[in-house]
Amino acid sequence: MAKKGRRRGSDGEQSRALLLSIAAEEFAVYGYHETKISNIVKKAGVSQPTFYLYFKSKEAIFQELVDLFRSDLRELTNQIRLEPDIDEAAVAAQIEESLKQIFRFFDENQNLTRIGFYVSVESIEIKTLMAAQIEENLVFEVEEGYFRQDIDMKIAAESLVGVIERLTFHQLFEGLKRPEELSREVVGFFLYGMLNSRQLTASYS
Amino acid sequence: MAKKGRRRGSDGEQSRALLLSIAAEEFAVYGYHETKISNIVKKAGVSQPTFYLYFKSKEAIFQELVDLFRSDLRELTNQIRLEPDIDEAAVAAQIEESLKQIFRFFDENQNLTRIGFYVSVESIEIKTLMAAQIEENLVFEVEEGYFRQDIDMKIAAESLVGVIERLTFHQLFEGLKRPEELSREVVGFFLYGMLNSRQLTASYS
Amino acid sequence: MAKKGRRRGSDGEQSRALLLSIAAEEFAVYGYHETKISNIVKKAGVSQPTFYLYFKSKEAIFQELVDLFRSDLRELTNQIRLEPDIDEAAVAAQIEESLKQIFRFFDENQNLTRIGFYVSVESIEIKTLMAAQIEENLVFEVEEGYFRQDIDMKIAAESLVGVIERLTFHQLFEGLKRPEELSREVVGFFLYGMLNSRQLTASYS
Amino acid sequence: MAKKGRRRGSDGEQSRALLLSIAAEEFAVYGYHETKISNIVKKAGVSQPTFYLYFKSKEAIFQELVDLFRSDLRELTNQIRLEPDIDEAAVAAQIEESLKQIFRFFDENQNLTRIGFYVSVESIEIKTLMAAQIEENLVFEVEEGYFRQDIDMKIAAESLVGVIERLTFHQLFEGLKRPEELSREVVGFFLYGMLNSRQLTASYS
DNA sequence: CATGAATGAGAATTCATTCAT
DNA sequence: GATGAATGAATTCTCATTCAT
């Protein structure tokens, strides 16, 4: 794991990583205030000053985790771009694939996700950012004519984020559904709606 | 409203209500830990012992607020039952109406909503409960044949809750949309999906 | 001692004053860093939170003492103005009287003096201020023609402050000399110098 | 200078000297407690253990600096002896020369002077010692009949130290006056006093 | 000669809560 | 019904110092 091949940093890097990982778990489970530095170091098997050797403060290590989540998430959502010129069926498949990746990322980073989506003060901001990125994609699709034009894409994007968050916490994290299942179902009714029939579309709007 | 047995209901009840209201605001804005009793009483213009005259502890007053939200919300979602034997167009209208009521309730109880949905540890549980109630309704609709049968209604219900939460916090509370608008739009794509065309339904699934 | 005749503040004011007084002694004896809040409260017979009931921080109570000394000293040196139109013998007597008052003030406020002149970071600033006020007085005398004109009054004033400080700490505080004695001697050689010559010696004394 | 028995005197001595010099500056500027070993070694470009290779403790290096100042000062004041059998004008000149040397020494050793006169707990003791040495000289002069006999030489010596200290810190170190100027002025009014009268003024200068 | 890593021992500060009136 | 005064119990953070290499 030692990032630097150099002589130095071998052991220290390890301690730091350990502390960071334990802290992530603690923050995720107990929240910011109920997480005690004394607990983290106890679990890491180091003394309290050691903690401050690697992190400036409790606030700092927390922020580092939040930032890590934020940037990883941004990177992920950024790379999810629908490729143009594909047919509609492919659009669905592609969206599904994107969702799957997102759910997987959350699944593999449960602690970080909990921190970034729940515990942190920036949670709202982070979700907003995610929604903005999704919206960008959606708007693009609208231009391509894939989506209905009477839907406010801001709302749609926000909604999708809401859906993702909720399912992540209550289905994915609780082990009720796997990423593939969730993405498939979400695409299912997000694209086609819940109604059984189609002719009514007209009656609404 | 007089919960306490005191017949007087004059000054005491007033102080209690005032404290409760200020506490709601503080918890909503600052969260549990950043909310200080000392601050609440200062804003209420009473002394700290007075606080403990009416509430057993910080935890207790917080819990009271959470419980209040929880029961009010339950009551609200409970009363939202689709009436049977209506045609499809009416179903949409009815759902829209229900959503509107929910958004309105949140709008009129912002502090409580923030507490119950965000601040409290039970937030997940509360949302789960709400999802369960919604699911019940949906399942009923499915039986009536209104909705597609290939959708997991648990997922759908959870998703709806996710959507509601997100839009509540980021559209409603920020003053970007009104309850009527939100409910209309949500119904729009929840029922009919986002796709522009319909024939593809087959290609998917 | 209760400043406010009101019902409130009776006991609290007392605790505050006690803490302040003990703190003064501690700071004077041990300096800023070696003085521990835990020690102050122990000596005052109160708990540590009680300290923070009356003082924002260790820094704050220290500053309060420094400020107290500074303003008291300023007031004292301010009121020391030589009256014009007096003859030389009277000038000497007047200066002696002023010095006596200053020495007395220091003697009666040993702790504060130690803090303001020794412990505080502002000690240099405080002495400079004192020198400036003394200089003002001296310059006035020069104009009246009492003093030699070839002396830099800034230097003279600074010197006088240096003398006062030194004698205060090493003669007065050690109980070797009393204010009257010190002021008399200081005037003696400050005005007439140390050289033996001089018939004028007689004019003084 | 090589205090350590090490014959090499190469790198080790260099590190030691560097640390000592940096420490002097830090202690002079920040005082004992605000000076951090971590800071010293950072500025010296060595590790903390290296510091402890050369100095037993923070206290030890500080003491070393204080002792250095103390002995250098003692040496200096010791060598300042008025030669007997000189006339008055020569006495003044000689004293002036002595003062100049003292001011120069302080000027060239600002950090050490600050430490010995201000920062150290022994500052009072050091000044007292200096005063005692000066007193010795003065008493000698008195016996020779140069000085007035009605002055307490203890007081005079202490005063002179007070003056020197004050002017050193507030005139010399602030670059307002040079050693020559200060010594001249101090002699001026220390010997002849501040009063205007006096034909003797002429005899000086 | 030198250091990366680690720590023992403490110090200030905060806050919910209670006692006596 | 109300409060001024006080506190127990934590908790974060700092820093001189050392061990193993």
Image (cartoon, coloured by chain):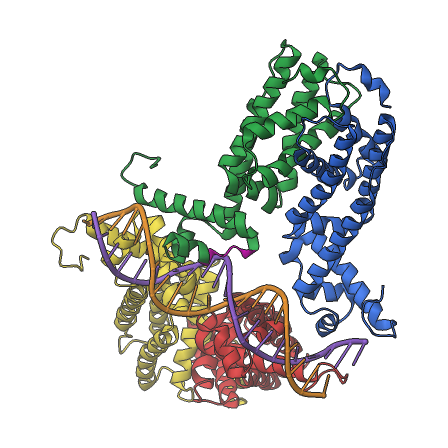
Chain colours: A red, B yellow, C green, D blue, E purple, F orange
Question: Residue at the spot x=38%, y=65% of the render?
Answer: B115
Q: Which residues are magenta?
A: C34-38
Asked whether A184 or D10 is in front, the reply is D10
Q: Nearer the viewer, residue D45 or D165?
A: D165
Q: Please, is residue A4 above or below residue B90 in the view?
A: below
Residue B204, percent from left and from top: 53, 89
Q: Position of residue D8 (x, y in %)?
A: 88, 75
Looking at this rendering, what residue extends furthest in the left direction?
Answer: B7
Q: Quadrant of the N terminus of chain C?
A: top left
User: Which quadrant of the view contains residue B94?
Assistant: bottom left
Q: Position of B199 compared to D12: left or right?
A: left
Q: Is residue C17 magenta?
A: no
Q: Is residue D121 above or below residue E8?
A: above
Query: Looking at this view, is A157 or C180 the one in front?
Result: C180
Give percent across and percent down for residue D7: 87, 74
Q: In the image, A145: left or right of A185?
A: right
Q: Is residue B177 above or below residue D46?
A: above
Q: Main secondary structure of the magenta part?
A: helix
Q: Inspect this view and state whether residue A159 appears.
A: no
Q: Is residue A117 left or right of residue D29?
A: left
A8 or C101, nearer to the observer: C101
Q: Which residue is depicted at the point 41% across and 79% down?
A: B158
Q: Residue at x 75, y 70 (%)?
A: D54
Quadrant location of the C terminus of chain C in the rendered image: top right
Task: Give residue C18's position: percent from left, percent from top.
Answer: 39, 46
